[in-house]
Image (cartoon, rainbow, N blue to C red):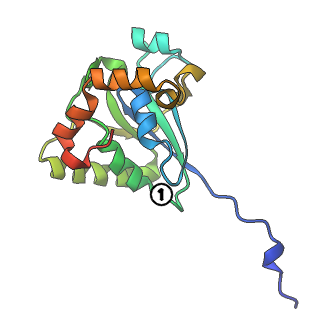
């Protein structure tokens, strides 16, 4: 029987996976993951609420139950879910139940939205991060919920609106507060 010529076969397409993290300002979370090796996209949006296809104005006004979040699409052959969730913890204050830094209120709460396959890695990562800080976290690991992308004006915001984003970031003292929490391990 002749051997198949594998040089003619098209390359296997990667099986991409996604991860969803709420961490206060979705611009900051998007920036923390965008461009990492293995990350195909980081999309700002909303998760956890009752309103279908919510707008930014609806979410920040309150009452929809959504949180600002980022959906990270990644190639697990290049970067693991565990590496991404390990990074996530270092982008937030996981001890604040009411929001993140200067962004406070229900739409700015933090949470990990994990699939059944991701849950063990998310919990192990959270537990390791709690040991690192020596503190209990209020940021929950919950089941995956519907993700709604934010409007195009919110996508790639930190890159497209550098001056405004940097003024926001510094005004909230996000880098300084993250460094106070995480030390040299801080991201963002």
Q: Is residue 66 in view?
A: no
Q: Tell me which residue sits at (32%, 43%) in the image.
A: 187
Q: Is residue 132 above or below residue 42?
A: below
- Residue 114: quadrant of the picture: top left
| Residue 122 shows in the view | yes
Decide which of 57, 146 is in the foreground and name it: 57
Q: Where residue 181 sits in the image (x, y, percent)?
A: 18, 39
* 170 vs 188: above or below: above
- Examine the rendered structure and indicate whether residue 4 appears above or below residue 63: below
Extreme right residue here? 2
Q: Residue at x 45, y 27 (%)?
A: 162
Is residue 106 left or right of 44 when viewed as pictured?
left
Q: Is residue 132 left or right of residue 103?
A: left
Identify which residue is drawn at 53% across, 54% down.
38
Q: In the drawing, does residue 121 fall left or right of residue 171?
A: right
Decide which of 170, 3 is in the foreground and name it. Answer: 170
Q: Position of residue 110 (x, y in %)?
A: 32, 31
Judging by the rendered image, the residue that carries numbered circle 1 is 79
Query: Local crowd at mark 1 within 10 Å, few (<14), some, or many (≥20)?
Result: some
Could you tell me which residue is drawn at 56 percent across and 27 percent down?
A: 149
């Amino acid at each position: 029987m002749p051997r198949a010529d594998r040089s003619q076969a098209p390359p296997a397409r990667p099986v991409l996976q996604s991860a969803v993290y709420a961490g206060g300002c979705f611009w900051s979370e998007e920036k923390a993951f965008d461009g990492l090796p293995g990350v195909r996209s980081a999309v700002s949006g909303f998760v956890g609420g009752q309103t279908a296809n919510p707008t930014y104005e609806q979410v920040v006004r309150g009452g929809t139950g959504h949180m600002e979040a980022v959906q990270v699409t990644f190639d697990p052959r290049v970067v693991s879910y565990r590496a991404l969730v390990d990074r996530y913890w270092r982008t937030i204050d996981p001890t604040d139940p009411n929001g993140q830094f200067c962004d406070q209120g229900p739409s700015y709460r933090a949470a990990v939205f994990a699939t059944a396959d991701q849950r063990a890695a998310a919990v192990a990562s959270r537990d390791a991060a709690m040991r690192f800080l020596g503190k209990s976290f209020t940021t929950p690991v919950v089941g995956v919920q519907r993700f709604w992308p934010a409007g195009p004006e919110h996508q790639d915001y930190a890159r497209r609106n550098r001056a405004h984003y940097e003024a926001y970031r510094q005004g909230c003292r996000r880098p300084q507060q993250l460094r106070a929490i995480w030390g040299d391990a801080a991201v963002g």
